[in-house]
Image: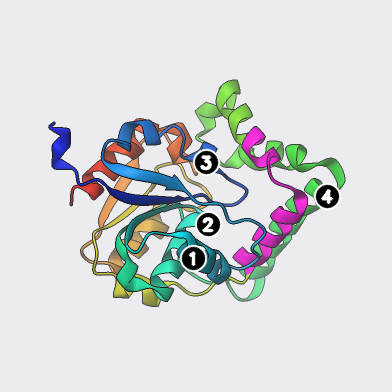
Amino acid sequence: MNRKMYPKEPLLLVPGLMCNEAVWAPVTPFIAHAADCQVVDHGAADSLPLMAEQLLQKAPARFALAGHSMGARVALEVVRQAPDRVSRIALLDTGYLPLAQGDAGRAEQDKRQQLLHIARTQGVRSMASAWVQGMVHPQRLADAALIETIVAMFECKSDDIFEAQIRALLARPDARPVLQSLSVPTLIACGDQDLWAPLAQHQAMRALVPHARLAVFADAGHMAPMEQAQAVADALLHWLAA
């Protein structure tokens, strides 16, 4: 395919919980010809609206936006705050609902607090080693290089940042109104074995954005950009050309 078909525009790549540029590194070589890729850093921000505000302060006047996991929730907050600045949006391996009420919400809080306890008492690396077990396709658990890359990425962040980002996620806003407002080219995508943000969740998001394209990455879990980089890149290139 002729690469000149793709417009070169700023593309902000937004990482998720405890992630950094490493989560996007396998993908960017495949899409760098189509967009000016820049990875966002959330710093010590402890709310999704604040993360979005920080992004907007440093962003170009208008840009494409792709978020993974918590990063996609940040992307939706960017649209909530400055819809006219976003030219297109891609939401990968993520969710859209606020913290559930009752037992389901308490269960999520407990699970996150257990991980934070491990990070505080045993170190971020130990926490990441436990967390990653349910975050990749089961067959990739034996991929020592992939697992080490993910664990090392988490280890770049402190337990204080982990706590701040947990606070942000537990206080997450309801993103349904933002999804329903989207009129720009929209990609919704996930790994077919994403246990944390399953396909059904993305299908529900797709129902709120009738014009969106839904992509499913075969043999990938929650860390799809690191597990199936080529498939993720192909979906992003299709979205960038829309």
Pointer 2 or 4: first along the chain: 2
Which element type, helix, strand or loop, lies under badge 4?
Answer: helix
Query: 117 above or below 225?
Result: below
Q: Residue 180 appears at what percent x and percent y? A: 31, 74
Q: What kind of residue is marked 1?
A: Gln
- Does the CB distance between marks 4 and 1 fall below 8 Å? no
Q: CA distance from mark 1 to mark 2?
A: 19 Å
Q: CA distance from mark 1 to mark 3?
A: 19 Å
Q: What kind of residue is marked 4?
A: Arg
Q: Would you name the residue on which mark 4 appears?
A: 120
Depth check: 141 or 126 in front?
126
The quarter in which the N terminus is drawn is: top left
Look at the image and tell me whether residue 73 can be seen.
no
Task: Classify residue 20 by image quadrant.
Answer: top right
Residue at the spot x=64%, y=63% of the render? 45
Q: CA distance from mark 3 to mark 4?
A: 24 Å
Q: Mark 2: give few (<14), some (14-19) or many (20+) Cα within 10 Å.
A: many
- Does the CB distance between marks 2 and 3 fall below 8 Å? no
Pointer 1 or 3: first along the chain: 3
Residue at the spot x=26%, y=40% of the render? 34
Which element type, helix, strand or loop, lies under badge 3?
Answer: helix
